[in-house]
């Protein structure tokens, strides 16, 4: 059996590398969602389990009209931190949400006045900023 050598242009190589990265990202997101669903099933009652409470809060509070269709909630402006502290006295809301993020149960995105809390895989993609105008001003 003879082997055949294929020569690819730089552009074709770049396209293949991009496709590989996209496939790897898709698989990672799918794995994260699957793991978080399994973990969420293991969570207890939101009235007695702080992790279940936070996940239930994200699901419930994002439906409010003032959330304007976002899949995430603001930790402070939604009332999550205050509700968490009233339901579970003595809990540190910041440490709690950071621990949940470390376990992959939620995702945290920094924003003005605090952070936004999302379920895994639901963080909206950010468009890359066009820095050409700013760079032109800086460089003259």
Image (cartoon, grey):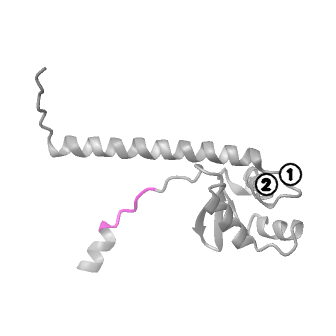
Mark 1 vs 2: CB contact within 8 A: yes
Q: Quadrant of residue 96?
A: bottom right
Q: Give the percent coordinates (x, y) of residue 11.
A: 19, 44
Q: Would residue 27 be found to the left or right of residue 100 on screen?
A: left
* Residue occupying the point 29% across, 73% down: 135
> Relative to residue 42, is residue 47 depicted above or below?
below
Q: Would residue 124 be found to the left or right of residue 89 on screen?
A: left
Q: Give the percent coordinates (x, y) of residue 94.
A: 70, 72
- Labels 1 and 2: the sequence-earlier one: 1
Q: CA distance from mark 1 to mark 2?
A: 6 Å
- What is the chief secondary structure element of the magenta stretch? loop
Identify the disc placed on residue 102.
Answer: none
* Residue occupying the point 66% across, 54% down: 105
In reply to whether residue 33 is colored magenta, the answer given is no
* Residue occupying the point 67% across, 65% down: 99
Identify the disc placed on residue 45.
Answer: 1
Residue projecting furthest to the front:
1
Q: Give the percent coordinates (x, y) of residue 35.
A: 62, 46
Q: Does dot 1 land on a helix, a strand or a loop?
A: loop
Q: Quadrant of residue 130?
A: bottom left
Judging by the rendered image, the residue that carries numbered circle 2 is: 52
* Residue occupying the point 64% across, 63% down: 116
> Relative to residue 106, is residue 33 depicted above or below?
above
In the depicted view, which residue is nearer to us: 89 or 62?
Answer: 89
In the depicted view, which residue is nearer to us: 55 or 67?
Answer: 55
Q: Does dot 2 land on a helix, a strand or a loop?
A: helix
> Relative to residue 56, is residue 16 depicted above or below?
above
Q: Quadrant of the C terminus?
A: bottom left
Q: Residues within 10 Å of mark 2 (few under 14, many from 20)?
A: some
Q: Quadrant of the N terminus?
A: top left
Magenta span: 127-132
């Amino acid at each position: 059996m003879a082997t055949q050598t294929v020569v690819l242009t730089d552009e074709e190589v770049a396209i293949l590398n991009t496709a590989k990265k996209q496939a790897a990202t898709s698989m990672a997101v799918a794995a994260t969602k699957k793991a978080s669903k399994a973990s969420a099933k293991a969570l207890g009652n939101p009235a007695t389990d702080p992790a279940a409470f936070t996940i239930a809060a994200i699901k419930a509070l994002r439906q409010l009209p003032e959330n304007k269709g976002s899949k995430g909630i603001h930790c402070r402006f939604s009332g999550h931190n205050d509700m968490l502290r009233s339901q579970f006295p003595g809990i540190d809301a910041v440490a709690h949400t950071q621990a949940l993020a470390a376990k992959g149960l939620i995702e945290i995105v920094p924003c003005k006045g605090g952070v936004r809390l999302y379920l895994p895989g639901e963080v909206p993609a950010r468009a890359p900023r066009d820095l050409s105008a700013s760079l032109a001003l800086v460089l003259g």
